[in-house]
Image (tube, rainbow, N blue to C red):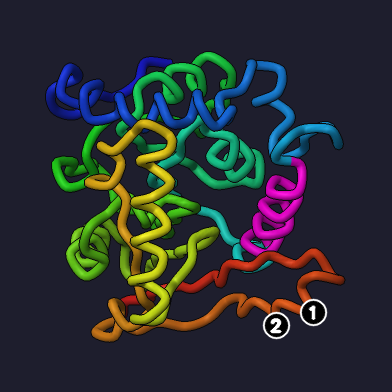
Amino acid sequence: MAIERIGDSDELINQAEAYVLLRKKEGRLYQDDQLMALPLVVKNHQYYNEWRLRAKSFEKLKKHLYGRKGRLLDIGCGNGWMSHALAKFGFEVTGLDTNSMELEQANNVFNLPNLNWVLGDIFKWEPAKKFDCIVLSASMQYFKSLPNLVGKLKSLLAPKGEVIFMDSFFYSDTERKQAQERSRIYYKEMGVREMEKQYFHHCLSDLAAFNVSIIYQPLHPLIRKFTNSPPFPIINVKFE
């Protein structure tokens, strides 16, 4: 199936260059057979523990969405593993990203009639139909302003639709400053300083103007250590 493309492809490639370089250096690009198995990876995989937590987080998302159907948008879908899993779960799914390399791989690996791909900037896209649910999994940190983002997403939602944020940290104001410094040092060490301009740290208070509820609240760190439960909250924003 052809990927729907929004805007200038060359501009998107240039924007994603630092991100793709970082993914390569981190070992986060996958062969097709590995991609098809996600979120399951072999035990000796360097990100085994991380993927185990992502799998548990995804199960919590499915529990929240159980029994529902409709149109779902996966923003920042990357290599598309979760878009594919949600399509198998019964939704009509659109996976959107600005990274053409991983999106092309997703289009080649995953083939379902209820799964589509869009390459482009969400702020420049006006889909023909509204969505019942919009999910951002490990992707909200690539947006500078959460209020601006949610305002845009509201325009893409059907009545009583919801936005779900998951697999990303929400910081306190003090924690945010510390996290910004850690990220700055990390990107410098990895040789991808350009990522400092593309990665942002958000607080739950950034969503104070919206109707926010908690789907999953992480347990205390000491308890998580023994239960291997996800460290990220899952929250949703609903609109009447």
Q: Is residue 132 left or right of residue 55?
A: left
Classify mark 2: residues with Cα within 10 Å, few (<14), some (14-19) or many (20+): few
Boundaries of the magenta span: 48-62
| Secondary structure of the residue carrying numbered label 2 | loop
Q: Which mark is residue 223?
A: 1
**Relative vertical location of residue 231 with respect to residue 197 in this rendering, above or below:** below
Residue designated by label 2: 220
Which image quarter is the C terminus in?
A: bottom left
**Relative vertical location of residue 182 with respect to residue 86 in this rendering, above or below:** below
Classify mark 1: residues with Cα within 10 Å, few (<14), some (14-19) or many (20+): few
Most frequent secondary structure within the magenta stretch: helix
- Looking at the image, which residue is at 42% across and 38% down? 189
Contact check, label 2 and label 1, Cβ < 8 Å? yes
Which image quarter is the N terminus in?
A: top left
Q: Position of residue 99 (x, y in %)?
A: 35, 28
Looking at the picture, which amino acid does disc 1 mark?
Ile
| Separation (CA) of disc 2 from disc 1 | 5 Å
Q: Which mark is residue 158?
A: none
Q: Quadrant of residue 34?
A: top right
